[in-house]
Image: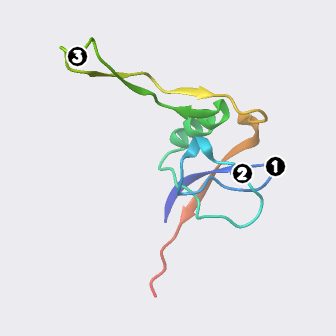
Amino acid sequence: MTSYWIIKHTPTGAVLPNRGLTSRWTPVAGPGLPPRLFPTQGAARRTAAAWAKGIWEKVIESESDGWEHPSYLVDYPPTPTPVPGRSRDQLEVIRVTLEVNDV
């Protein structure tokens, strides 16, 4: 048996799915995609905290000093855009156990 961690949205009972961008996840009650499995509790907690801060976007711009010089990329650090109603208190990090049965 192997233990993993999942993130559950307490008000809806939805779990963070295995597919898609984490920061853009909108919890909806009912059956969904298989849960995203985290190898450590710390990884799940950090993801839950990042989700609560909002939608994260990384901006990379191309700039140039004129036609005589080659253009270059400006890589800005990722920043969150807050989403109203999101709170870390809405998420629960739960330990799950995966067991493989011989068929």
* Residue sitting at the far left: 68
Nearer the N terminus, badge 1 or badge 3?
1
The number of numbered discs placed on residues in the rendered structure image is: 3
Cα–Cα span, label 2 and label 1: 9 Å
Amino acid at dot 2? Pro
Residue beneath label 3, please? 67
- How far is mark 1 from mark 3, CA to CA? 55 Å
Check whether the beta carbons of the residues at disc 2 and disc 1 lie within 8 A of each other: yes
Q: Tell me the residue that label 2 is attached to.
A: 27
Residue 28, horizontal then vertical, whole percent: 75, 56
Element marked by disc 3: loop
In the drawing, does residue 55 fall left or right of residue 102?
right
Residue position for label 1: 11
Q: Residue at x 44, y 23 (%)?
A: 77
- Under mark 1, the amino acid is Pro
Q: Element under label 1?
A: loop
Between 18 and 39, the one lying in front of the other is 18
Mark 2 element type:
loop
Of all residues, the one furthest to the front in this rendering is 67
- Vertical placement of residue 93 versus 103, above or below: above
- Mark before the other along the chain sequence, 3 or 2: 2
Q: Residue 66's x, y, as percent?
A: 26, 13
